[in-house]
Amino acid sequence: MTRSEELFARAVKRIPGGVNSPVRAYGAIGETPRFIQGAVGSKIFDVDGNSYTDYIGSWGPMILGHNHPAIREAVIKASENGLSFGCATAKEVEMAEFICERIPHVEMIRMVNSGTEAVMSALRAARGFTGRDKIIKFAGCYHGHTDAMLVSAGSGVMTSGVPDSAGVPKGCTQDTMIAVYNDLGSVEELLEESRGRVAAVIVEPVGANMGVVPPADGFLEGLRRLCDKHGAVLIFDEVITGFRLKFDGAAGFYGVTPDLVTYGKIIGAGMPVGAYGGRKEIMEKISPAGPVYQAGTLSGNPIAMAAGLAQLQILFEDPEIYTRLYQKGEMMFEGIRRIFVENNIPYQVNSVASLGCIFFTEEKVTDYASAKTSDTDAFAAYFKYMLNHGVHLAPSQFEAMFLSDAHTEEDIEAALKLIKEYFYA
C-alpha cells in the first residue's frame, strides 16, 4: 500500500469522502487521490516521492508556477508581523489601489475569502442596487456553492431553478433562472418573461467548469447589450479567467465591460481569498457605505494580500508573460489537435490562451448539453495513463487544463508525446 493509499484510508474515516473538496476525489476515475507534499515551478510531488508535471495549478491561480520565490518571500516577510488581526492593514489599501488603478472597469473593490463568497456578495450587491430579485445564470457555469447558485444545470431554458444539491430548499433557487450558454435568444426570452425583475446576468466569460467552452462570436457583446436594454447588472465571474487571459482578464481579452467582476484565489496567488468589484455606484451600496450587508473577519488577510500583490505586480510589470502563456497554449492545444487530425481521432479540443480541454466526444462542444455527450469512461482511461506517466491532470472530464509561465517547451513536448503514444496504442 502506498502512503497516499494509507492516508486516504485514514481520511475516509474522518472526512466525508476522504477529501475536503469533491474536485479532489478520484472516485469517478477509479483511483486513489495523490496526497501532495510539495511543488515548485511546473512540478508537483506526492508523499510517495513521485513527481508530476502539473496542469491543475491549484485550479488556476499559479500563473507563475508553484512556489515562486518572490511570492514565498513576500509571505515569509508578512508573517513575521503576525497572521491575522481582524483590523484594517496597509496591504488591503495597496491591493485595492493596485487593481483599481490598472483595470478600468474596477472602480472599487471589496476583498472576501473565496470565489464562492465573491459571487454571493456580488449578486447581493446587484439586487441591492437594482431593487430586483431574479438572477440569470447559464447551464454548466459554476459560481460557487451558495444555495442560489446550486441549481439544475440542464440544457434547456428554465424560469425557476431546481436545486442541484440536497439541503438546498426550493425557495432558495426560485429566483435563479437558467439560460443556455452561447445562446442569446435564451437570455432574451428570460429577460422578456421577467421584464423589470431581473437584477443580474452572471456568466463565466469563458465556460471553464464544463471543460473549456469559449464564448461564441458576439455572445458577450450581446449580453452587454441585453443587460443595458433591460437594466440588469452584467457580472463576469472571473475566478478562472481573471488575470490569466490578460491582466484585465476576459473583459480586456474580449473587449466587453461588465458592471461587476468576481475573483477567487488568484487575488492571493493561490491563498484562500477572493474579491468582487466594479462600478462605483454599485459598490457604494456595500456596507458600511450603503445598505447591502457583507462582512468577513479574514477579508483582506495580510498574508494573502502580500502574496497576491507580489504576483499581480509581476504580472503587470512583465506583460510578456501573457505572450508566453498564449504561445504555450498554442503549442499544447494545437499540438493535440494536430495529433487528432493526423490519426483520425474524432475528439474535440477547446482552448482559450493558456486554458484548454479535450472532450471525449465527436460533437462540437459549444454549451453544457454538448459537453455532456463526452464519454467519461474514455476520459478515465486516458487520465490514468497520463497520471501513471507523470502528468497531473484534473480528475474530471469537465475541468480545464492550466498552463503556467513555469511550464517549459520540454514539459509540453513530453505531454504531447504521451498523448500521441496513448492514442496510438
Image (spheres, helix red, strand yellow):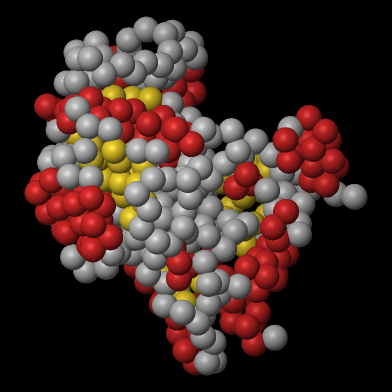
Please report the residue visible at 77 percent of the width from the left and 52 percent of the height from the top. Answer: 32
Q: Is residue 260 left or right of residue 270?
A: left
- For the image, the number of numbered tags is 0
Residue 380 is situated, as x and y percent measured from the top left of the image, at: 67, 66
Q: Is residue 349 visible?
A: yes
Quarter of the image where one finds residue 107: top left
Relative to the observer, which residue lies in front, 106 or 408? 106
Which residue is at the front of the view, 106 or 88? 106
Quadrant of image for the C terminus: bottom right
Q: Is residue 362 above or below residue 279?
A: below
Could you tell me if residue 72 is visible in this image?
A: no
Relative to residue 314, is residue 112 depicted above or below?
Answer: above
Which residue occupies 30% across, 54% down?
A: 205
Q: Position of residue 110 (x, y in %)?
A: 28, 24
Residue farthest to the left, as pictured:
229
Q: Is residue 156 left or right of residue 184?
A: right
Residue at the image point whose x is 26% and y is 52% from the top = 190
Quarter occupied by residue 387:
bottom right
**In the image, residue 334 above or below residue 216:** below
Report x, y in % for residue 139. 41, 55
Front in this rendered view, residue 292 or 280: 292
Left or right: 146 as drawn, with respect to 236: right
**Is 177 placed left or right of 346 in the picture?**
left
The residue located at (83%, 33%) in the rendering is 13
In the picture shown, does residue 120 fall above or below 331? above
The image shows residue 307 at horizontal and vertical percentages of 41, 30
Of residues 190 and 125, the one nearer the viewer is 190
Query: Quick one: which residue is furthest to the front in this view?
Result: 193
